[in-house]
Amino acid sequence: MALLNSLFTWIMKKRIHQIELFMKYPHDVQDEWFQSLISAAEATEWGKMHGYNSIYTVEEFKNRVPIQDYDDIKGYVDRMIKGEQNILWPSDIKWFAKSSGTTSDRSKFIPVSIEALEECHYQGGKDMLSIYCHNQPDNKLFSGKTVVIGGSSQINNFSPDSYYGDLSSILIRNLPFWAEFKRTPNIEVTLNPNFEEKIEQIAQITIKENVTSLAGVPTWNIVMANRILDITGKDNLLEVWPNLEFYGHGGVSFKPYREQFKKLIPSDNMYYLENYNASEGYFGIQDQSDSEDLLLMLDYGVYYEFLPTENLQEAHPKTLALHEVELGKNYALIISTNAGLWRYKIGDTIKFTSIAPYRFQISGRTKQYINTFGEELIVDNAEMALQEACRQTDASIRDYTAGPVYFKEKGVGAHEWIIEFEKSPSNFNRFCELLDQKLREVNSDYDAKRYKNMALNSPIIHEVAKDTFYNWMKSRGKLGGQNKVPRLANNREFIDSILEQLK
């Protein structure tokens, strides 16, 4: 096993040189990918419609192709699902990543080409391991196995030759043999569509394995970890897996879960790396252990544009190229990819923390915010405020969501929060005050609306019992995979649904 571990580590570290090259020459790399994508799609239906054969500059591309969202491409995707090809992308597309999004129950089916699988998603997974091996040269990662909690995948109802499932299930279904060799449990268990049954099976199987790493969304890994501790009677995961050393996570912000993982894995040597991997592509990896910033991955078959969030509502907003972005500003991410997504607005917002190289933080969602009263509260604001309130009251949070309380006649509005604590605040009233105070500090629009309670009263905060969010997600059929608790909403859909369940 020591020899095998050394071999895998050596292979993974070879990629670092290529990562350093795109960090050094980011604009050249992006220009090359732009030309490559346009050239590849010239003969597709979409490429012919927009004259890709005569597009030579990014400005020509912007002038001919409007910014898209899912509703704009849904008709094309429906045809691809039914078996038509060469529509958005030249290679045959048989896989579709099912995503319900975070503010709508409607399912989206994102096309996943073989190029997107190999050049983007799998390359991202390998690069995260490469970065870890580079940062931790004495690791023993490959001497054991990785626990992965996948979603489910099934043949769809439109064509026997096309398939859908959440992204994790598609990736697991198509993994190369060497990756399957290092993963646990087996594929049948990992893709079991019954989430609760799957968690039980994973727990029973993996407690007998030498597990050195974990991968996946923090929410569902915590569910698995708690079940394993219930079964074994152990106090923490290191008593079950003494060689556990690495967790590659993504899907949701890690901030609300950090303290829980410190308790589950009480070791200063445990190494955490975040990735930014969505159904639409793999975009970023945390490459420095002492910073939460993500390195923008520039050679995955994705061409990036950045739309300033203040221009989101414009009819024809102007996007910026990579060399035009500024530090600290919020941008909606616009992508063109090797799966045939063209100038596609994926719904996430980011802000750059460095431009040499390009590093960023995920700041929120274009549709996951509260702006009922002009306060423009985004997830990034909420995470910062919750973290500070928890720090000062010795609390930790499992899950939360928030929405507006609307004006009533002579009354004013407010924000209503539902919070499930892992550890309750030492002083709940103080927690509420600190949350409001920090929100006012980090968001001037919120602060203006809170001034003398003119437009917004103090937030209304409900502390709910453990497993409230788990039971709510279960009632909606949203357990496991990439399903996430919606953090902020500009309406009361989620707040009212949870409160109704608590009656």
Image: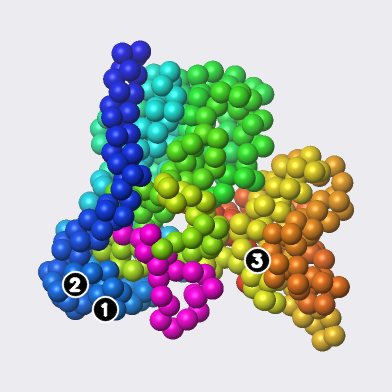
- Residue 92 percent location from the top left of the image: 17, 59
Give whichever of discs 1 and 3 has the lower sequence position.
1
Confirm whether the magenta stretch covers residue 195: no
Mark 1 or mark 3, whichever is nearer to me: 1
In which quadrant is the N terminus drawn?
Answer: top left
- Name which residue type carries label 3: Leu
Give whichever of discs 3 and 2 has the lower sequence position.
2
Tell me if mark 3 has few (under 14), some (14-19) or many (20+) residues whose alpha carbon lies within 10 angstroms of its own: many
Confirm whether the magenta stretch covers residue 320: yes
Give whichever of discs 2 and 1 has the lower sequence position.
2
Residue at the (79%, 70%) spot, across then down: 450
Identity of the residue furthest to the top in this view: 2
- Residue 243 percent location from the top left of the image: 50, 19
- Name which residue type carries label 2: Ile
* Span colored in magenta: 301-323
In the picture provided, is 62 more to the left or to the right than 497?
left
- Residue 303 percent location from the top left of the image: 31, 59
Tags 1 and 3 touching, CB below 8 Å: no
In the picture provided, is 48 more to the left or to the right than 201?
left
Q: CA distance from mark 2 to mark 1?
A: 9 Å
Q: CA distance from mark 1 to mark 3?
A: 34 Å
Judging by the rendered image, the residue that carries numbered circle 3 is 377
Tags 2 and 1 touching, CB below 8 Å: yes
Label 3 SS = strand
Tell me if mark 2 has few (under 14), some (14-19) or many (20+) residues whose alpha carbon lies within 10 angstroms of its own: some
Residue at the (42%, 31%) spot, across then down: 132
Disc sitting over residue 55 in the figure: 2
Disc sitting over residue 464 in the figure: none
- Name which residue type carries label 1: Arg
Judging by the rendered image, the residue that carries numbered circle 1 is 64
